Structures are given as C-alpha cells and as structure tokens.
Image: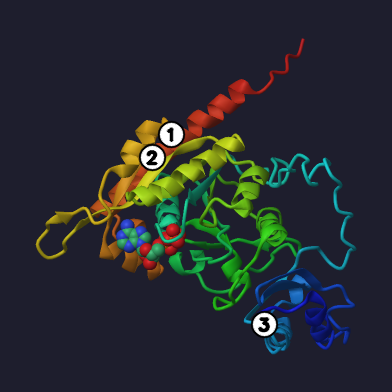
Amino acid sequence: MAGVSEQEILDALAKVTEPGTGKDIVSAGMVQGLQTKDGHVAFAIEVDPAKGAELEPMRKLAEEVVYDLKGVISATVVLTAERAGNAPPPPAPGVGEMGGPGGPVPKIGAPDILPGVKSIVAIASGKGGVGKSTTAVNVALGLAAAGHKVGLLDADIYGPSMPRMMGITGQPTSSDGKNLDALENFGIKVMSMGFLVEEDTPMIWRGPMVQSALEQMMRDVNWGELDVMIIDMPPGTGDAQLTMAQRVPLTGAIIVSTPQDIALLDARRGLNMFRKVDVPVLGLIENMSYFTCPHCGERSDIFSHGGARTEADKLGMDFLGEIPLHMSIRETSDGGNPIVVSEPEGEHAKAYRSIAGKVWDSIERTLGEQTAAAPKIVVQ
Ligand code: ADP
C-alpha cells in the first residue's frame, strides 16, 4: 500500500536546515500544516517574508527529501509567512469559541482593516475551467472603465492566474516598510499569490493555509481607497470556499457558469453556499454562452445556450449577462491584455461593460439595503 507516516517525513525534514540560522526546519517549528494522503504529501514552511526568494533552494530541498522517501508519490512544499516575524503562534481557539470548532467564524478584512474599501464582491464558480478568472478580470476592467476605483484580489491560490491575465510581472515591494503595495496595471490594483510564489510551484493548500494567505493579501497590503474590490475565488464550493465566504465581509457574490446542465448544478451549489452564510448573490453570468464561427459567422450553441438565464429565473437570481466562446477572449486574457482594454470598441468588451454596469447597480442597491437594515443611532 502506498503511504508514508508523518514521523518518517519529519525525520527526513530534520536534515534540512535554514540558511543563515543553521537550525533544522523541524525543531525550529517551521513545518506547518503537514498533510499526507495515499502517498501525496503537502506542507508549508513558515519563513520570514523578507527572505522568501533566498529560501527557495531550501524549499526545493525539503520537497526532494520528502519525495525521495519510500511510499511518497508527490511532495508539494510552499513557503508561507503566516505570522509576522517569529512571534509564537496564538493559542488555538477552543470548541465553541470564536474561530474554534463549532464557534462563530471571525471576519477578516472588517472595516477597520480595509477602511478605504467600500464594497467587496466575490466571483465564484461551481467548478474550474468555466472562465471565472477571465470574467473577473474583464468585469473589473469594465468597472474601472466606468470610472470606479477597482482592486482585484486573486484568492484562487490553487492556480493564481491574475499576474498573467493582467500582464503583471515582478514582485510587490513595500513603500512604508510595513505593508506590501499592490501591483497595478490598466488602472487596477492587483494582489495575487502568484506574485509571491513561482508560477510552477504546485499549490495544494488547504484550510488554514488558504485562510492565512487570503488574510495577508487583505490585511497586509496597501489597497488605498477602492470603490470595489473584486475577489477571484478558488473554483468550487468546498470548505475552503465556504470559510472564505464567511470570513470576508462580502457585499455580494457573482456566480459564473457555462450553460450545460452539469455546470449549472455546480453553480446552484455555489448559490446555496453563499445563501448559507448570508452573502447576497448579485447574479449569474453565463460564460461560453454560444460560439460564432469566425469564418462563416454562423452561431453554434456548443454547450447548449440560455441555461443560466433559465436557471437564474428559477432560483430568483438576477441574470447579469452572457459572454460567447470566442478565440479573441481567450487570446487576449491569456496574453495579458484582456479584451475590455485591448478591443474596447468590440462587442465582447461592450458585453463585459454592460455586465459591469449591472454589477455596480447591484452593489449600490445592496449597500443601500445593508445601511437601511443597520441599527440607527439617534442622537438627542
Ligand atoms: P477558471 O477561472 O474558471 O478556471 P479561466 O478564466 O482560467 O477559468 O478560463 C479557462 C480558459 O478558458 C482560459 O484559457 C481562458 O482564456 C478561456 N476562456 C474563458 N472564457 C472564455 C470565453 N468566453 N471564450 C474563449 N475562451 C475563454
């Protein structure tokens, strides 16, 4: 049977030392979140973020020594900076306590943490590959084109695609020596795990690690004043997504789906997930809605068509619009020059801008309702 024990892994990792301090990474308490399943091993090494790049050889070595163990099929190691400096970890919350098992989930990014951000909208999908990130980028650009101040947070830390789609390379720096500055292109501030880890590092991050990365990208980044922060969620509706939906003070969520029944079924799960945690779903976008042949102009409904609109009606959700399957959408977003900025006069850019307009209306409506529902303080 394939498999390896945690002890065997830790014994192997005890041979890996941190350059500079010379301490082995196990007794230094740097190995975090070790997970093994049927020979697949994943964990994080907690490091000082300032040393991230120079510790890459240590990360690789840790991966290699684990991979070389008998019974190991894959080893995935990421560097993380979960705690600032080397402060000891806070005690884990108990059962029923805030953040503990069965207890309420604390919100991160509360108003005092993101004071300049007026609204936060999650872009989600029931499964991967439906074009969630492409939609997030182009809707964000559509909002920016309408004059809004927009930030884009790539929370899809399993497969961050924002650096590539937004055509941004390089690493964020810190102008105040405290927080990272978001990188910027096309007038949008962007933060992504992709800026902090190499693109080919596979990231099998789970639970707490996902949360801490998200927390850092919200709290430890100078976002400044934003009308709206768009969050590109990891695909799916698992625990990680649910916790994210609970912990971030979302104004609302948008679900992207292709029109096939099966994708819609997943989208419905997404809707239920947000409803469960009282996050308003602002609407559904149908992506890869239809295909127009670039040669003869004939339209074909490759994944059927209109399913999302019907589904939205059935579920009492707003339908925000449909985007066709088109080569130029793929080429421009994969090439770092999304269609809303590269072909602003084209029909696809128009469609994204129209969706962005509906999203903005919906944000304003929701914020209005939330303000009206908040308890009023009467000064006499
Ligand atoms: P997800 O975030 O749901 O995993 P992506 O946005 O990364 O999906 O899209 C997956 C692939 O499909 C990318 O190569 C992207 O360029 C392409 N794509 C997305 N939407 C469209 C579309 N409307 N037309 C053509 N290609 C698209």
Q: Which residue is mark 2?
A: 357
**Front residue (pair 71, 110):** 71
Residue 13 rendering spot, x and y as whole percentages: 80, 83
Depth check, mark 1 against mark 3: the one in front is 3
Q: CA distance from mark 1 to mark 3?
A: 52 Å
Tag 3 secondary structure: loop
Tag 2 secondary structure: helix
Residue 140 rendering spot, x and y as whole percentages: 45, 51
Q: Which mark is residue 338?
A: none
Q: Which mark is residue 72?
A: 3
Q: Which residue is mark 1?
A: 361
Residue flagged by tag 3: what amino acid is it?
Val
Q: CA distance from mark 2 to mark 1?
A: 6 Å
Residue 202 rendering spot, x and y as whole percentages: 58, 74
Residue flagged by tag 2: what amino acid is it?
Gly
Q: Are marks 2 and 1 in contact (CB under 8 Å)?
A: yes
**Front residue (pair 187, 349):** 349
